[in-house]
Image: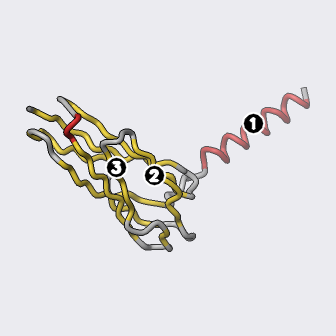
Amino acid sequence: MKTFSCFITFLFVNICICFGQKSKDEVIFNKRRVDVGTIMNDTLLKCSFKFTNVSSHDIKVNKIYRSCNCTKVFVTDSLLRTGESSYIYMIVDTSSKNGYFEVASVVQLNTLQENYALKVVGNKKD
């Protein structure tokens, strides 16, 4: 019985600690999804995503993954000191798209939440 009481107490304390902790953002994006609406014909889309380092340490862009070859992605500054901002640009060639489309890039940072998905969505009419 004593072991059971210790186990319950241990479990209760751990639950309180886990739920009492607040997750602290290290980076803030001004947006993570851009809806370009309805576009006509073949369009070259250029979308920007601003992100800011709100942590107490440097943040580095380790890698950016693309969901398809129709997208080019680049970052203005890959190393951000505390308080600094940078932009990630997604250039999407819609010539291979028909109807509703969704293109994503995953940005890998040296933060606790390692991966951040950025999306461009729209509808192409011919």
Question: Quadrant of the rendered structure where residue 9 is?
Answer: top right
N-terminal of the pair, mark 3 or mark 2, is 3
N-terminal of the pair, mark 3 or mark 1, is 1
N-terminal of the pair, mark 1 or mark 2, is 1
Q: Give above or below for 21 relative to 54.
A: above
Residue type at numbered disc 1:
Leu
**Residue at point 42%, 73% (across, down):** 84
**Residue at point 19%, 49% (across, down):** 44
Read off the residue under disc 1: 11
Q: Quick one: label 1, few (<14), some, or many (20+) residues within 10 Å?
A: few
**Residue lying at the far top of the rendered structure:** 1
Q: Which mark is residue 41?
A: none
Check disc 2 and report its element: helix, strand or loop. strand
Q: Nearer the viewer, mark 1 or mark 2?
A: 2
Check disc 3 and report its element: helix, strand or loop. loop
Q: Quick one: label 2, few (<14), some, or many (20+) residues within 10 Å?
A: some
Q: Nearer the viewer, mark 3 or mark 2?
A: 2
Check disc 1 and report its element: helix, strand or loop. helix
Residue type at numbered disc 3:
Arg
**Where does the C terminus fall, quadrant-wise?**
top left
Q: Is residue 92 left or right of residue 55?
A: left
Between 68 and 89, the residue placed more toward the observer is 68
Question: Quadrant of the rendered structure where residue 39 is?
Answer: top left
Q: Which mark is residue 64?
A: 2
Q: Is residue 12 left or right of residue 62?
A: right
Question: Quadrant of the rendered structure where residue 35 is?
Answer: top left
Read off the residue under disc 3: 32
